[in-house]
């Protein structure tokens, strides 16, 4: 290694506090470190020159792929013209206005305004506050509880980490906090009663939600929070009929639906929004990742007409809402968003997510569907998952201590493909850039098969 590379390795171990990384092991040099220097299309390149096919698109966010000069140029032009001005008190830039318009044009029907943030977590935080504000303005101060789902992922903040339904994001942080409640994950493969049909399981999810609402008191429940497809919780499309059944319960008790489309927004499911894909009619939508394909940090809360009218009424009577971020609608990020959404259209990436995504899932199914340790191959659009089991017939899961998922992901990385070992269960997750080609899908499929065989025999 050069002196410079040695320095960087030491500084990384000594000074960089990485997210989701075993702190002590990393500091002691016991975990791998990797410095990424470039990327093009679906590939990243590290400082040793190794190219890897990134089958998780960063953290399912680099939707247009790496190295898109159109976006880099748009950001540079904006930074030269005006790197920053705030959006308080009616200020805007051409980029932020244009992007608002482009988002509403693409959003499901009845959406009205976009409030910009920087991350999926802060946009969900904004949406929590909007839900509470809404009920306060309507004179319903008791209607504040929010129901999310076990295995949902909605961020890492105090309230958004509470919405999240994954153990590792709660443990040792005193989460979840009130007034957040969790109901069943719509995860048919992991149902506790194996005799249930899919239709029975869907009906039970809706019934359990209704039971919780009735136990807590419908007048205390403000909103239901959900990703159209469970993401970090295991990449799990909902069972048939799930969204109509859930929405019927929400309508019955006047409960808002917040669709967290941080992963599914802007094409991931082969439709512009997951809400449209499943016929959901949310009152608020959370967006991030695919909005800029992660070329710049930008998120948004899309507010429906129904909520907007109440906000207008509240502001007229009470004055402006005390809620704002310094970097809301940051011009450089907004310019990245405009260029990114144009590119998604110009390259036909929503359509490609649908067709090449289906090709990838079918290929994984064909290659692995009969493997004795593959319990489930599933997905939707350009999202796929392979769930490993110790015994297929009895659906017996592995002991988590065996770390089967992480070991297979490591074996895949050695073979040049990045998949994600999802955090709860032995699940390999795939969310490649939406520009994936069938030949690249073939590489993912063959490397997954080889890595599973090498790890499990
Ligand atoms: N919501 C969903 C569905 C996500 O998948 C994520 C991140 O993966 C978030 C929210 C949080 O986004 P961020 O990490 O940008 O705060």
Image (cartoon, rainbow, N blue to C red):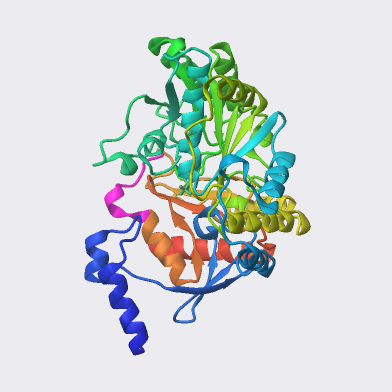
* Residue 113 x %, y %: 65, 35
Of 155 and 77, the residue lying toward us: 77
- Residue at figure coordinates x 52%, y 66% from the top left: 447
Along the horizontal axis of the image, is 362 left or right of 314?
right
Residue 83 drawn at (x, y percent): 58, 62
Please indicate whether residue 405 sits to the left or right of residue 314 in the image. left
Which image quadrant for residue 77?
A: bottom right
Q: Is residue 29 above or below residue 380?
A: below
- Residue at 64% across / 45% down in the picture? 269
- State whether residue 451 appears in this view: yes
Q: Quadrant of the C terminus?
A: bottom left
Viewed as shown, does residue 15 lie left or right of 289?
left
**Within the image, what quadrant is residue 336 found in?**
bottom right
Quadrant position of residue 228: top right
Residue sticking out furthest to the bottom = 2
Q: Is residue 362 magenta?
A: no
| Residue at 46 percent of width and 65 percent of height | 412
Looking at the image, can residue 271 be seen?
A: no
Camera-side residue: 395 or 73?
73
- Left or right of 135? Residue 150 is left
Q: Is residue 48 above or below residue 456?
A: below
Position of the N terminus by quadrant? bottom left
Q: Is residue 398 magenta?
A: yes
Q: Eyeballing the image, is 301 above or below 37? A: above
Q: Residue 106 in the image: state x and y as whole percent.
A: 72, 41
Is the magenta region chiefly helix, strand or loop?
Answer: loop
Residue 53 spot, x, y in % from top left: 55, 68
Magenta region: which residues?
A: 395-404
């Amino acid at each position: 290694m050069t002196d410079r590379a040695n320095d960087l390795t030491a500084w990384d171990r000594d000074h960089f506090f990485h997210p989701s990384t075993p702190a002590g092991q990393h500091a002691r040099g016991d975990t791998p470190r990797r410095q990424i220097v470039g990327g093009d299309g679906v590939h990243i390149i590290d400082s040793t020159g190794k190219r890897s096919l990134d089958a998780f698109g960063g953290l399912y966010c680099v939707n247009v792929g790496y190295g898109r000069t159109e976006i880099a140029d748009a950001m540079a032009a904006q930074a030269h013209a005006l790197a920053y001005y705030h959006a308080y008190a009616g200020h805007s830039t051409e980029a932020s206005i244009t992007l608002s318009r482009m988002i509403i044009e693409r959003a499901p029907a009845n959406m009205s305004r976009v409030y910009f943030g920087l991350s999926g977590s802060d946009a969900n935080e904004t949406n929590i506050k909007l839900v509470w504000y809404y009920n306060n303005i309507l004179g319903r101060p008791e209607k504040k509880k929010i129901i999310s789902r076990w295995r949902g992922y909605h961020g890492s903040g105090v309230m958004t980490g509470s919405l999240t339904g994954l153990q590792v994001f709660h443990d040792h942080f005193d989460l979840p906090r009130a007034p957040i409640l969790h109901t069943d994950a719509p995860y048919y493969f992991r149902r506790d009663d194996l005799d249930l049909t899919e239709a029975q399981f869907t009906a039970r999810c809706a019934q359990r939600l209704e039971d919780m609402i009735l136990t807590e008191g419908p007048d205390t429940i403000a909103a239901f929070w959900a990703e159209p497809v469970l993401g970090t919780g295991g990449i799990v499309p909902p069972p048939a009929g799930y969204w109509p059944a859930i929405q019927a319960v929400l309508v019955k008790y006047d409960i808002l639906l917040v669709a967290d489309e941080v992963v599914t927004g802007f094409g991931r499911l082969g439709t512009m929004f997951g809400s449209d894909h499943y016929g959901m009619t949310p009152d608020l939508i959370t967006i991030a990742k695919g909005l800029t394909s992660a070329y710049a940090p930008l998120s948004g809360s899309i507010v429906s007409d129904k909520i907007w009218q109440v906000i207008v009424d509240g502001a007229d009577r009470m004055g402006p809402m005390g809620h704002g971020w310094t970097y809301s609608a940051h011009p450089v990020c907004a310019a990245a968003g405009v260029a990114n959404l144009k590119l998604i259209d110009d390259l036909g990436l929503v359509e490609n997510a649908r067709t090449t995504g289906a090709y990838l899932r079918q290929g994984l199914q064909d290659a692995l569907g009969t493997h004795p340790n593959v319990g489930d191959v599933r997905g939707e659009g350009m999202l796929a998952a392979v769930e490993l089991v110790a015994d297929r017939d009895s659906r017996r899961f592995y002991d988590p201590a065996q770390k089967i998922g992480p070991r297979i992901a490591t074996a895949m990385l050695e073979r040049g493909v990045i998949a994600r070992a999802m955090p709860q269960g032995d699940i390999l997750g795939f969310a490649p850039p939406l520009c994936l080609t069938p030949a690249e899908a073939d590489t993912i499929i063959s490397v997954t098969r080889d890595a599973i065989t090498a790890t499990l025999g």
